[in-house]
Structure formats: C-alpha cells, structure tokens
C-alpha cells in the first residue's frame, strides 16, 4: 500500500491502514502478506494462524462473513500451493471489507472451523467440503450439503473429469411425481 493511501484528506490513518496495523501488532511473528486492489485489503495468512487471525478480525469489527470459498490452483503455473481458501469479511457499520486467504496442500486439507466466530460459516464450510474436500475441524455438522452422501469425489477440483467418473449410474433416477 502506498503512503498516500494510508492517510485520508485530514492526514489521519485510513480505516484500512489502521486495521492492518492492529492485526500486524497482534501477530508480529506471523508472516502476513498484505495487498490492496481497488480499495479492498487482502491478506494471505498461514493456515496454522487462520483461526486466531479470523477471531482478531471479528474483534476489530469485521462482524459478517460474506462468503467462504476455495480455489483449486492445480493448473495455475505460478501457484506453489494446491488450494486457496478465501474468506470475505465485512464491517457492517463502516462498510469496510477484507479478503483473507490461506493455502492448503494434500494430504492435509484441514482448517479449523469458523462457525464459532461467525455462525454463517456453517453452510459455507459444508459447501467447500462438498465441492473441494476441505475439512473444517470442529464444525458442528461436517457432512455433504449438495451431493449425496455416497458421492466419493469432489467435483470442483481441477483433476475431476468434465464428464464425471461414472458416479451417476450408482444413484437411483428420481422422477417427478404426477400431481
């Protein structure tokens, strides 16, 4: 972030800079990588620190988890990690947003659940589990949300074939009941 964007017209620190400074001061040893794009802060956090840093964001006013998703970085040539988990946070009072990212690699695709921080993480974490196979330890109901329990794959992974792996033949055809 440039020096000009760290201050507002009256010379005071911007909310984004203040939030960044507070998080950095709470976690001085954590290798946090900050960037900004179109006025929105982004921070990459080590997966081992994600729960404590998300909790700190909540304490600092980020009271809504807008979205939680994952990205399979398998075919990104510059990527060094397989999966990126993305949390989009919002301060509903000020309108400030922060994007928090962390990275995972197989075989350990486990993160601590954020349901204790934001109850809204419930279904979002289940969707990331269902589509990518990322497990959220401590989640109150970590089971499939969109696919049948017998479905053994994760269809949003880049190594999943476009036409599937023939899973559909194992499931009964459900027809609409005539009314």
Image (cartoon, helix red, strand yellow):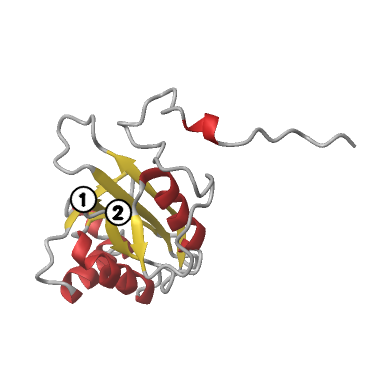
Q: Secondary structure at mark 2?
A: strand
Mark 2: give few (<14), some (14-19) or many (20+) Cα within 10 Å.
some
- The disc, 2 or 1, on the residue closer to the chain's N-terminal end is 2
Counting from the top left corner in percent of width and height, residue 127 is at 46, 50
Rendered view: 86 above or below 137: above
The circle drawn on residue 107 is: 1
Q: CA distance from mark 2 to mark 1?
A: 30 Å
The one nearer the camera, 123 or 22, is 123
Q: Secondary structure at mark 1?
A: loop
Mark 1: give few (<14), some (14-19) or many (20+) Cα within 10 Å.
few
Say which residue label 2 marks.
Answer: 41
Residue appearing at x 87%, y 34% in the figure? 178
The one nearer the camera, 6 or 127, is 127
The one nearer the camera, 161 or 122, is 161
Residue appearing at x 47%, y 64% in the figure? 64
The one nearer the camera, 53 or 6, is 53
The circle drawn on residue 159 is: none
Counting from the top left corner in percent of width and height, residue 176 is at 77, 34
Counting from the top left corner in percent of width and height, residue 114 is at 39, 67
Quadrant of res 175: top right
Find the residue positioned furthest to the left: 29
Report the number of discs.
2
């Amino acid at each position: 972030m440039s020096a000009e964007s760290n201050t507002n017209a009256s010379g005071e620190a911007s909310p984004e800079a203040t939030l960044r400074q507070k998080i950095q001061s709470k976690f001085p040893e954590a290798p946090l990588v900050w960037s900004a794009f179109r006025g929105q802060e982004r921070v990459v956090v080590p997966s081992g620190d994600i729960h404590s840093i998300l909790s700190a964001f909540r304490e600092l006013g980020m009271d809504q988890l807008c979205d939680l998703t994952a990205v399979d970085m398998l075919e990104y040539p510059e990527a060094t990690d397989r999966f990126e988990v993305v949390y989009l946070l919002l301060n509903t009072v000020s309108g400030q947003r922060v994007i928090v990212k962390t990275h995972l690699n197989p075989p350990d695709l486990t993160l601590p659940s954020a349901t204790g921080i934001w109850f809204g993480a419930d279904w979002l974490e289940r969707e990331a589990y269902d589509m990518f196979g990322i497990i959220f330890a401590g989640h109150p109901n970590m089971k499939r949300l969109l696919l049948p329990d017998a479905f053994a794959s994760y269809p949003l992974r880049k190594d999943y074939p476009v036409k599937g792996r023939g899973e559909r033949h194992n499931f009964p055809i459900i027809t609409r009941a005539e009314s």
